[in-house]
Amino acid sequence: MKIWNALSPDREKVKELARKYSLSTMSAMLLEEKNFPDDKSIEQFLSDKPVFEDPMLIKDMDKAVRTVRAAVLNNEKICVYGDYDADGVTSTTLMYSFLKSRGADVTYYIPARDTEGYGLNNNAVDYLHSQGIELIVTVDNGISAFEQVERANSHGMKVVITDHHAPPQILPNACAVVDPHRKDDTSTFKHFAGVGLAFKFAVAYDGENADITALLDEYSDLAAVGTVGDVVSLTGENRVLVKEGLQRINRGGRLGLNMLKEVSGLNKGKIRSGNVAFSICPRINAGGRLGLSHKSVRLLLSDDPKEAEDIAGELNVDNMERQRIEKEILEAVEKVLLNDDKVRFRKILVISGEGWHQGVIGIVAARIKDRYGKPVIIITYDGDKAKGSGRSIEGFRMCDGVEYCKDLLTIFGGHPMAAGMSLPTANIDAFRDRLNEYADKVTNTFYPTVELACRLIPSKVTVRMVESLSQLEPYGAGNPTPIFGMYGVNIIRITPLSEGKHTKLTFESEQSYFDALYFGMPSDKLLFAVGDKVNIAVSAGINEYNSVKSISYIIKDICFSQSDNEALLKSSTMFDSLMCGKKPDTEMKRELLPGRDECAVVYKYLKKNKGFRYSAEALHNRIAEPTMSFGKLCVIINAFRELGLIEASSNYSMLDITLVDRPQKVDILSAPIIKRLV
């Protein structure tokens, strides 16, 4: 259940953009909605010409280049110190490959996620010193490594930091700290991933003689994968890197990526940013999540077909194992939410469990966030130590909420939409309470949203219209894949896919028929039935089979056609507050307190249908009682359960209601939940 925000393009501006830049009406409309400030910005966005700002404008880039050049000249041992995610792996591969090609005595190091964690650590610094390393060059990490840099300095080692994360007020005492987010940085574009910054270093290292075309040909594929994988803005120079990189990936230049395409089933057809995000990056990440990121670097460096094939196969198996672990934790999380109202009905869902794999909890947090439309933190604990990973929605700055709880945490960090933390196991409950206290303090409501580019009539969508969307590729953060609204379509068939993991829905609209895929939606958890009239939010693409092209739709959200989502969300939030113990005020009573007649309507419906097994939203839609808010329905169901009139359980918003025979009548107003509202 989300709020749909539909944009309203200026039709005259759309016509002008279409004429001026030879765009389809659809592409011109999407471009107009981006609100570019001037023609130059539009031309840069649409341009295929790679244009990069002078890398020396980035603060300390000159120092970094001088330090590394001197180390190469003096044949000093250099270590590229990376990270275990797709950005860290590609950053490491790029920097290592580049320095080696320039004659450096260089190696690389990826910390183990489960035993070392993110970034430089003291044990790693000591180990590298014992191996004779004289210069550490960090990629995608290091901006907060005060203690570790001092430790390296004490060993007589030098450190150059290249990082894209937000810097603290005081920087580490390194030879150079290259980070565009420094307050004293004068460069224009700030939104690089770690791999983009590594590419900028390569350009700076080669200086005035840098052959940008050759560097792009050699490294843009790595830059594209890391940039897409780190979900940074695909605007400015990032857009150039990803455009160029996708072209190289499609040409098939790098053996390791070719093998990943093969095991991902992407060896046919054109690779787009979405394929990178959802097929290639998860397999690169899988090794790191399960503790073996060095495999991913070896794959991307390999020029041995047998070795590359073997490692790609291992990463594919790792990814399947990651999916198995993810499913296992998801089921455990859903069980907690089913059985613990004190967790389930909070504004911020903080769910903990013993022994959950810390490399997967961030993915699980994202899944639960999408399912429940609330910010989520998943915490795993082992003994007295716990680690958490959170994902948020628009309207709640996760990093600020976590910082509000800093006295309960040992380590924390993040940004508005995600955060990570470590804490004593004993503090988990207090952390949940404090975080929700903060949420209540800073805002009353924050609802999940879907931004629609426009409304589409299914029968009028053509292959040519959808193909024209490629004019604005690559899509990603900062240039999101357009989402379209289709209203009042009827579900006529529901087909499970991939052993029920995904669902295909067939719709009818004005005597035209079309299919849409609902990825990640198990068919047995779909909250809709054949015959329901719904609105769907979809992305659109093209399938080609035997030279015949057809339109493919992917569902991003779905709701009943007559639903007022904002009213439902407001009512649901009030009900959650009641379940969390909030004392009812006049507004809450008006929204949630049902009358006897409304209770009777619900009971009669359940009796007539011998129970119910769909979502609460579906029950609300089917009953369609004008005076009954969604919150009232939730109160009625809980009252029936408290009085023993029904047995009801819910999982992932799915209600399973069975009527119980009662020899005596009961007074609905005697239910504890009703008494709290009276």
Image (cartoon, helix red, strand yellow):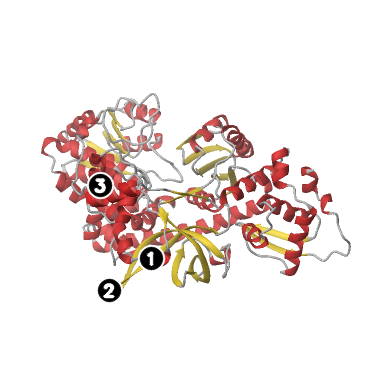
Give left or right: position of 553 versus 273.
right
First in sequence: mark 2 or mark 1?
A: 1
Q: Which sits in the foreground, 167 or 409?
A: 167
Categorize mark 2 by other alpha carbons within 10 Å: few (<14), some (14-19), many (20+): few
Numbered-mark total: 3
* Inter-mark Cα distance, 3 to 2: 31 Å
Which of the two labelled residues, at mark 3 and mark 2, occupies the earlier sequence position?
Answer: 3
Residue that carries the numbered disc 2 in the rendered image: 547
Q: Can you tell which of label 2 and label 1 is closer to the viewer?
A: 1
Structural crowding at the residue carrying mark 1, measured as other residues with C-alpha within 10 Å and reported as few (<14), some (14–19) or many (≥20): few
Residue 423 is at least partly visible in this image: yes
Residue type at the position of mark 2:
Ser
The Cα atoms of the two marked residues, 2 and 1, are separated by 22 Å
Q: Determine which residue is flagged by label 1.
A: 460
Where residue 451 appears, x then y in whole percent?
Answer: 44, 49
Secondary element type, mark 3: helix
Q: Residue at x 55, y 65 (%)?
A: 533
Which residue has dot 3 on it?
A: 241
For the C terminus, the image quarter is: top right
In primary-sequence order, the first of circles 3 and 1 is 3
Please determine whether, in this image, residue 390 is positioned above or below residue 322.
Answer: above
Quick one: 473 or 94, which is closer to the camera? 473
Q: Amino acid at mark 3?
A: Leu
Instruction: Estimate the spatial distance between the alpha carbons at disc 3 and disc 1, rounded to whole Å.
Output: 35 Å
